[in-house]
Amino acid sequence: MDSERRMSEGEVQDEVEKTKIRIMRALVEKEDPSSKDVDDLTIRRFLRAREVDVEKASNMFLKYLRWRRSFVPRGSILESEVRNEISQNKFFMQGTDKLGRPIAVLFGARHKQSKSSLEEFKRFVVFCFDKICSRMPAGQEKFVAIADLQGWGYANSDIRGYLAALSILQDCYPERLGKLLIIHVPYVFMTAWKMVCPFIDSRTKKKIVFIENNKLKQTLLEDIDESQLLDVLGGKLTPVPIQDC
């Protein structure tokens, strides 16, 4: 009986969400006709990111469309636009977790703050997110990220860059992150973390997990099969640079 009741509640929630998707689509198409090309799954991600509040989700989505046209006018970021960031060899994509979500791996100690402009780093962030999203298997909308901070120091502390990446993730790729696993965390990193943490929304915070060194392998294996882990993390796979995915 309880099971039947829960199923009924779930069906009601689905219908409510579908209705709000239709309402939101009508609103955004009226404001921006180009949104007709966007599928319902994208609309749903923005809706969920704003707790199914149609007005807030619509404003967020319309802002995203304006940003996308301005920041990615050709529809994608070219490798030639992010050469310096790619040369740091810091971002990889390989394997899937037990839920079928693609895995991205970032080596934080390889990131160096841009001495000239933040713009290339922001383009690189979009380049990476677009690559990940293009590799989503059918029926999957989220990815898992592993941030390996082995060797991270003050030279890698790029608060401007971290905040820019966070803003792009939360505002332009809502409900894409499934989980962020942060490993090999040095004590000095916590200073930077305290500066960034207030800007992380509650939905994203719930997806962030700091893993203790002495529990690293067993914790990773809770979500990821050994055959799907990078060899540098104790698995079987060879890292594939994000530009080669």
Image (spheres, grey):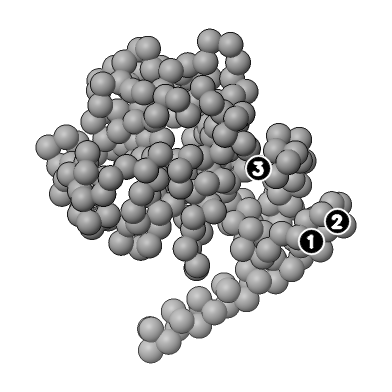
The amino acid type of the residue labelled 2 equals Pro
Residue 114, above or below 52: above
C-alpha span from label 1 to label 3: 19 Å
Horizontal and vertical percent position of residue 226: 20, 54
Q: Relative to residue 10, is residue 230 drawn left or right?
A: left
Q: Is residue 33 visible?
A: yes
Q: Is residue 145 visible?
A: no
- Asked if the residues shown at circle 1 and circle 2 are in contact, with their CB atoms under 8 angstroms apart, the answer is yes
Q: Within the image, what quadrant is residue 44 found in?
A: bottom right
117 or 157, nearer to the observer: 117
The residue singled out by tag 1 in the image is 36
Q: Relative to residue 130, is residue 196 drawn left or right?
A: left
Q: Relative to residue 132, is residue 105 drawn left or right?
A: left
The residue singled out by tag 2 in the image is 33
Which dot marks residue 76? 3
* Residue positioned 15% across, 49% down in the render: 218
* Residue positioned 21% across, 50% down in the render: 236
Dot 3 or dot 2, earlier in sequence: 2
Residue 1, above or below 213: below
* Residue positioned 46% across, 47% down in the render: 245
Mark 1, residues whose alpha carbon is within 10 Å: few (<14), some, or many (≥20)? few
Dot 1 or dot 3, earlier in sequence: 1
Residue 106, above or below 103: above
In this rendering, the label closer to the viewer, 1 or 3: 3
* Secondary structure state at the residue bearing disc 3: loop
Q: How many marks?
A: 3
* Secondary structure state at the residue bearing disc 2: helix
- Asked if the residues shown at circle 3 and circle 2 are in contact, with their CB atoms under 8 angstroms apart, the answer is no
Horizontal and vertical percent position of residue 172: 62, 43
